[in-house]
Amino acid sequence: MSELMSEEINVIEDMEAATDFELKHTPYVEVSDVEAGRLVKVSIGLNGIEHPQTEDHLIDAICVLVDGDMVAELAFTADDEPVAECEVAAEGEIVVRASCNLHGIWQATA
């Protein structure tokens, strides 16, 4: 089982009170309808606050879940931009989790 499914999950409860630390770790999710279902686009960081992507501090994975079932998981290195795009055929709630190697798992719901 992926660590993105088993570790403690961080979620911003109040976006108006969110800190820069929280904003730079939280996935930004866009969902649009496509012929085969829905296209999910994910980037990390909200309100223009970007997460570092260095050997010492990086987003090392992103996963997409539909109704609690993982439908995509992507791994990243310091050389990668932590963005993801995938098509999902299933209807249901889309949740995205991102793993920071220093600060754990961060979640957003589309």
Image (tube, rainbow, N blue to C red):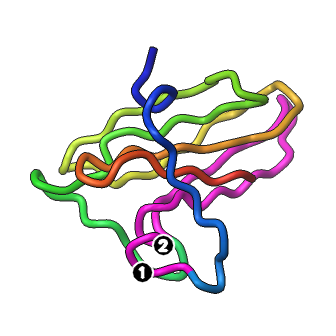
Q: Residue at the location (54% across, 57% down)?
A: 27
Which quadrant is home to the N terminus? top left
Q: Residue at the location (71% across, 51% down)?
A: 109
Percent x, y of residue 72? 56, 27
Q: Residue under label 2, please give it.
A: 23
- Kindly state the secondary structure of the residue where label 1 is placed: helix
Q: Is residue 64 above or below residue 100?
A: above
In this view, the residue farthest toward the left is: 55
Q: Which amino acid lies under the numbered mark 1 shown in the image of this protein?
A: Asp
Percent x, y of residue 61? 38, 38
- Kindly state the secondary structure of the residue where label 2 is placed: helix
Q: Residue under label 1, please give it.
A: 20
Q: Residue at the location (54% across, 79% down)?
A: 18
Within-10-Å neighbours for mark 1: few <14, some 14–19, many 20+:
some
Q: Is residue 107 magenta?
A: no
Identify the disc placed on residue 96: none
State the residue in front, 25 or 32. Answer: 25
Q: Is residue 39 magenta?
A: yes
| Whole-number angstrom distance, CA of label 1 to CA of label 2 | 5 Å
Percent x, y of residue 33? 86, 46
Quadrant in the picture for residue 105: top left
Give the residues in magenta.
18-45
Q: Is residue 56 left or right of residue 45?
A: left
In this view, the residue farthest toward the bottom is: 16
Q: Is residue 63 above or below residue 27?
A: above
Q: Is residue 92 left or right of residue 66?
A: right
Circles 1 and 2: CB distance less than 8 Å? yes
State the residue in front, 100 or 39. Answer: 100
Q: Is residue 108 left or right of residue 18?
A: right
